[in-house]
Image (spheres, rainbow, N blue to C red):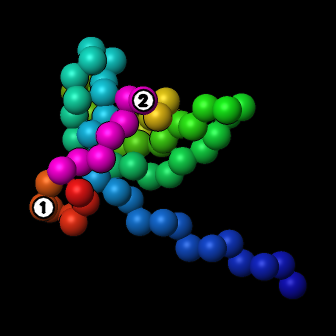
């Protein structure tokens, strides 16, 4: 019998740098590594539309809000 996949980690509130360089609220859905670089998969607004995108780690930072306990 195959081993079940572990449950997904909860999404985390972060700030993501969009294509214009502006820091916008986003939800971090997960991390993956390509070579030596880490990428975060986030749900965010891009050009006014909802999108799920992969961003290099330098374009993500923790949110400092009280809405979800992230500090």
Q: Residue furthest bottom?
A: 1
Name above or below for residue 19 compared with residue 16.
above
Provide the secondary structure element on which disc 1 rests. Answer: loop
Image quadrant holding the N terminus, namely bottom right
Q: Residue furthest right?
A: 1
Image quadrant holding the C terminus, namely bottom left
**Could you tell me which residue is drawn at 41 percent across and 42 percent down?**
42
| Mark 2–mark 1 distance (CA, rounded to whole Å) | 23 Å
The answer to which image quadrant residue 34 occupies is top right
Q: Which mark is residue 41?
A: none
Report x, y in % for residue 53. 45, 34
Q: Is residue 55 visible?
A: no
Name above or below for residue 19 compared with residue 61.
above
Residue span colored magenta: 58-64
Provide the secondary structure element on which disc 2 rests. Answer: helix
- Residue 49 lies left or right of residue 43; in this view the side is left
Report x, y in % for residue 29. 44, 52
Q: Which mark is residue 58?
A: 2
Magenta span includes 42: no
Give the labeled residue for mark 1: 66
**Could you tell me which residue is drawn at 41 percent across and 66 percent down?**
10
């Amino acid at each position: 019998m195959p081993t079940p996949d572990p449950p997904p980690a909860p999404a985390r509130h972060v700030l993501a740098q969009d294509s214009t360089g502006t820091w916008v609220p986003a939800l971090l859905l997960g991390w993956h590594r390509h070579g030596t670089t880490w990428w975060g998969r986030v749900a965010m607004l891009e050009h006014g539309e909802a999108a799920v995108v992969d961003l290099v780690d330098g374009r993500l930072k923790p949110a400092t809000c009280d809405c979800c306990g992230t500090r």
